[in-house]
Amino acid sequence: MPISDVSGYDPGHFGRVYEDLLKPAILNAGFHPLRADDTNKTDYIVIEIIQKVVNSAIVLCDFSDRNPNVMYELGIRQAFNLPATLIRDHQTEKISDIKGLCYTEYDETLCVDSVQKDIANGHLSGIKAAIVPDEQQVSPDTQLLLSVVSSLERKINAIDSRADGGPRFFRIIEEKVEFGDTLEGEIRNDVYDSNKDLIGKIVDIHPNEEEIFVKKQNGKVVSFHARSIKSKGLSVIGF
């Protein structure tokens, strides 16, 4: 969603949308809300945002004011064929490229009655990932785009990886993984992120490459490199 002040809206408007409307609706739906400016203030904030766009169980996209950053991040999410929920306020014009997708509207005035109604009626179940029919052929341009974007997550692992002296966020000793908190994991153990949220189960360990592979609940397998910032805070115990 837009984070900074936007022309045509009162100062701090989208902060109030998040705090008064979206956050309560997300919590009511049983999810943990996290916005881009809630991430750690580091040089890697863009990387963190992309990681969360790809790895989160559900992404809520508020394309009010037709913010280009929001549309870019939605494109990444959809390129990975992952579920997202789209919303916009009443004053934002429709966008032709996504007019065929389902979305929910809300009252940008944020008056108490409308906020309570929007929270109660909020649909956060997510849009099902698109499925290409068997008989439909994907164009070469689309195949190239999907190939480039799907390699993004693998490239994230390499960012901040240094040949010598870089920090390791876990160590592989024989067939076990020793994480930064000294807890050890092995194949079939559950792995948790720095927020103690479940990522998935360890399905493979590559000692030579200092890399582990984790199968998420949706069946997708993701890799973690020992020196990647993405691996910071990984553990086998969630609290």
Image (cartoon, grey):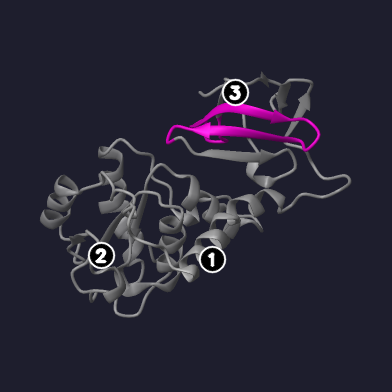
Between the residue at mark 2 and the residue at mark 1, the CA separation in whole angstroms equals 30 Å
Residue drawn at (71%, 24%), measured in percent from left and top?
A: 177
Displayed quadrant of residue 188: top right
Mark 3 residue element: loop
Residue at the farthest bottom position:
7
* Amino acid found under the numbered disc labelled 3: Val
3 vs 1, front mark: 1
Write the start and end of the magenta stretch as one range. Answer: 192-218
Mark 1 residue element: helix
Between the residue at mark 2 and the residue at mark 3, the CA separation in whole angstroms equals 38 Å
Residue 110 percent coordinates (x, y): 20, 61
Residue matched to label 3: 236
Residue matched to label 1: 144
Q: Are marks 2 and 1 in contact (CB under 8 Å)?
A: no
Q: Does the stretch in magenta take in 151?
A: no
* Amino acid found under the numbered disc labelled 2: Arg
Residue drawn at (79%, 20%), measured in percent from left and top?
A: 174
Q: Does the stretch in magenta take in 201?
A: yes
Displayed quadrant of residue 172: top right
Q: Is residue 46 above or below residue 7?
A: above
Q: Which mark is residue 88?
A: 2
Residue at the farthest front position:
135
Residue 99 percent coordinates (x, y): 24, 69
Residue 20 percent coordinates (x, y): 27, 52
Residue drawn at (12%, 51%), measured in percent from left and top?
A: 117
Between the residue at mark 3 and the residue at mark 1, the CA separation in whole angstroms equals 36 Å
